[in-house]
Image (cartoon, rainbow, N blue to C red):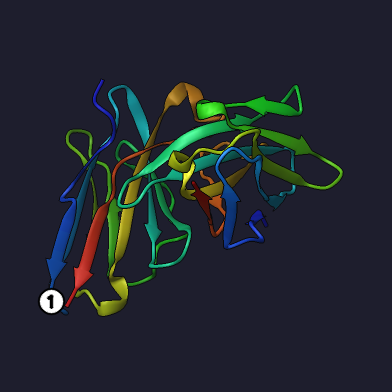
Amino acid sequence: NAGVMQNPRHLVRRRGQEARLRCSPMKGHSHVYWYRQLPEEGLKFMVYLQKENIIDESGMPKERFSAEFPKEGPSILRIQQVVRGDSAAYFCASSPLTSANTGELFFGEGSRLTVL
Amino acid sequence: AQSVAQPEDQVNVAEGNPLTVKCTYSVSGNPYLFWYVQYPNRGLQFLLKYITGDNLVKGSYGFEAEFNKSQTSFHLKKPSALVSDSALYFCAVRDGSSNTGKLIFGQGTTLQVKP
């Protein structure tokens, strides 16, 4: 079974460019979560999505950040006009519908964004 | 609001000695509690969880955790540490009354096991 797949694993952008991070959940999983890990810090929740729906985006910065999980294809976290403070590891996690209530999440290897 | 505290940034133990990584939590409803481990430049791996039932939970790689409701704690333990246990450990909580799988993570504790 393939796990949660994230790409790219590493991404370098210059200030002002756009970053797109992709996440394919585990097979059979319909819930996707995005977390951000800043250097020397823990994981901060960003957004929770189900297919075609944003369920909870309470952790998303108000500007420049957006997320989607279309009916077909991976979930995408998009950061417009990146700044140096966006440099972080972005982790995607998924869970199946049946375990959503027990909260066990399966994490990808992360996408490490560096903004020059 | 939900929160998790891991009071130690780093824990150092000698190989073969018992280890404890501390975690306390705050939720409004019944807690669902988790421990994850992160190796350098990798994602998080699930170790164990407490949902209900026995207060002592056994997980992967010989780890266990004890749920203490009166102290609102969920400390991670292992009777005999291995050098390969050296990693970053995260405690996480979810409010059991919530209908989402969203987890709130602690800041993480670096475990260093010396030979």
Q: Residue at x 16, y 78 (%)?
A: A116
Residue A110: x and y in percent read: 28, 49
Q: Is residue B76 left or right of residue A107?
A: right
> Residue at 34% of width from left, 50% of height from top?
A91
Q: Is residue A80 visible?
A: no
Name which residue lies at 13% across and 66% down. A12
Which residue carries the number 1 mark? A14
User: How many badges with numbers are in the image?
Assistant: 1
Sort mark 1 into few (<14), some (14-19) or many (20+) by Cα contacts within 10 Å: some
Q: Is residue A54 left or right of residue B16?
A: left
The amino acid type found where label 1 is placed reads Arg
In percent of width and height, residue B83 lies at 46, 42
Q: Indicate the chain on which mark 1 is placed.
A: A
Question: Which of the pair B44/B104 is nearer the observer?
Answer: B44
Q: Please state the horizontal and vertical placement of residue A49, each as a whole percent of the image.
A: 37, 43
Determine whether, in the image, residue A110 is placed left or right of residue A19: right
Element at label 1 = loop
